[in-house]
Amino acid sequence: MEPIVLAYVGAALMVGLSGIGSAYGLTICGNAVVGAMKKAPEKMGSYIGLSALPSSQGLYGFVAFIMAAQPYLVSDISWMAAGGIFGAGLLVGFAGLFSAIRQGQVCANGIAATAAGHNMFATTMVMAVFPELYAILALVAALMIPGTFA
């Protein structure tokens, strides 16, 4: 196996897993919005604001991919750089996957509480930041893996 194959798999993991997590988290929120619209359709702005939050993890995976792809995904990549990109792919991909799903669950609960008449928008926004911090930390850590982006 050539080292470029390992690097490509890592790059695919960055975008793929974090994108899957965002899609899953957004679906959780979307389902909550559909239910909330039955109770309080006038709060649609709050619902949309909360339901969009899990999309950021997919963006972090894409940022990591862009950092890896230009100009490091080349045919003469070293094993060290390829391993770094693969490790970064695992790190960013799985952190994005799980944090987006869990963030979607937090936001869905906030959407349901808002629909029930509680003033939970700001509290939910704060609570939703906590799972996202780990996706951000994973992205920063990936940028610090030796050989990955240097």
Image: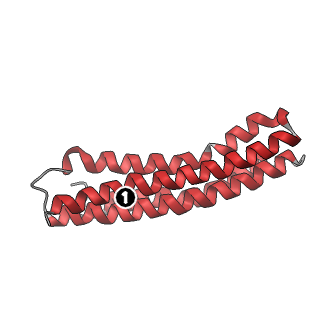
Quick one: quadrant of the C terminus?
bottom left
Residue 79 x %, y %: 15, 66
Q: Is residue 136 toward the left or the right of residue 112 in the image? A: left
How are the colours assigned in the image?
secondary structure
Residue 57 drawn at (x, y percent): 50, 51
Quadrant holding the N terminus: bottom left
Query: Where does the image place residue 73, in percent across and percent down from the top left?
Result: 20, 51
Query: Is residue 145 rendered to the left or right of residue 34?
Result: left
For this rendering, which residue is in front, 76 or 141? 76
Residue 147: tell me if it is visible. no
In this view of the protein, can residue 94 be seen by the observer? yes
Task: State which quadrant residue 138 falls in.
Answer: bottom left
For this view, does 64 lie left or right of residue 118?
left
Q: Residue at x 48, y 62 (%)?
A: 95
Residue 125 appears left or right of 90: right
Q: Which residue is mark 1?
A: 13
**Amino acid identity at mark 1:** Leu
Q: Is residue 62 above or below residue 142?
A: above
Foreground residue among 10 and 119: 10
Q: Position of residue 140 (x, y in %)?
A: 40, 57
* Residue at point 62%, 61% (across, down): 102
Q: Nearer the viewer, residue 113 or 133?
A: 113
Where disc 1 sits, the SS reads helix
Label 1: how many Cα within 10 Å (few below 14, some 14–19, many 20+): many
- Residue at screen point 41% across, 59% down: 92
- Does residue 99 sit above or below 58 in this rendering? below
**Farthest residue in the left direction?**
76
51 relative to 129, above or below = above
